[in-house]
Amino acid sequence: MTIDLARFPREYWTGSQNPFLKVDEHQLNDIESWIKSMVPASDEYCVELIGRCPGPVSLYIGALLRDMNCQKLTCINPGRGTFTVWDYTGAGE
């Protein structure tokens, strides 16, 4: 599945044009609910995370996905490249 950070809902924004400008507990709760609404109900899945965001938000999203049994996390940063954060599928062996 693909999660595009550019589609982060406007109602979760902190009032500025950049939803990740100010990271607070309320916003982290919103991010958690948004991620959980996008993740399939299956036991195992892989995620491509597209877009840029601050390091703390990326770490938080990664921790959520790992706790939700994400088997492979790939980050795609347009213009900068692609990297695999983790891969438990065995495909990388």
Image (cartoon, grey):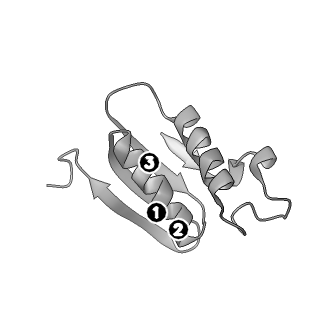
The residue shown at (52%, 68%) is 56
Q: Is there CB contact under 8 Å for labels 3 and 2?
A: no
Q: Position of residue 49 (x, y in %)?
A: 51, 53
Describe the element under mark 1 as helix, strand or loop. helix
Q: Is residue 39 left or right of residue 92?
A: right
Disc 2: which residue: 56
Disc 3: which residue: 64
Tell which circle, 3 or 2, labels the residue nearer the N-terminal end. 2
| 57 and 2: which is toward the camera | 57
Residue type indicated by callout 2: Pro
Q: Is residue 50 left or right of residue 18?
A: left
Structural crowding at the residue carrying mark 1, measured as other residues with C-alpha within 10 Å and reported as few (<14), some (14–19) or many (≥20): few
The residue shown at (79%, 58%) is 14
Disc 1: which residue: 59
Structural crowding at the residue carrying mark 3, measured as other residues with C-alpha within 10 Å and reported as few (<14), some (14–19) or many (≥20): some
Q: Splitting the image into 4 quarters, where does residue 50 fall?
A: bottom right
Describe the element under mark 3 as helix, strand or loop. helix
Most extreme residue toward the left, as rendered? 93
| 28 and 41: which is toward the camera | 28
Q: Position of residue 16 (x, y in %)?
A: 84, 64
Q: Is residue 87 left or right of residue 80?
A: left
| 60 and 46: which is toward the camera | 60
Quadrant containing the C terminus is: bottom left
Describe the element under mark 2 as helix, strand or loop. helix
Residue type indicated by callout 3: Leu
Q: Is there CB contact under 8 Å for labels 1 and 2?
A: yes
Q: Splitting the image into 4 quarters, where does residue 71 fall?
A: top left
Residue type indicated by callout 1: Leu
Structural crowding at the residue carrying mark 2, measured as other residues with C-alpha within 10 Å and reported as few (<14), some (14–19) or many (≥20): few
Question: Rounded to the nearest whole Å, what is the CA distance between mark 1 and mark 2?
Answer: 5 Å
Question: Rounded to the nearest whole Å, what is the CA distance between mark 3 and mark 1?
Answer: 9 Å
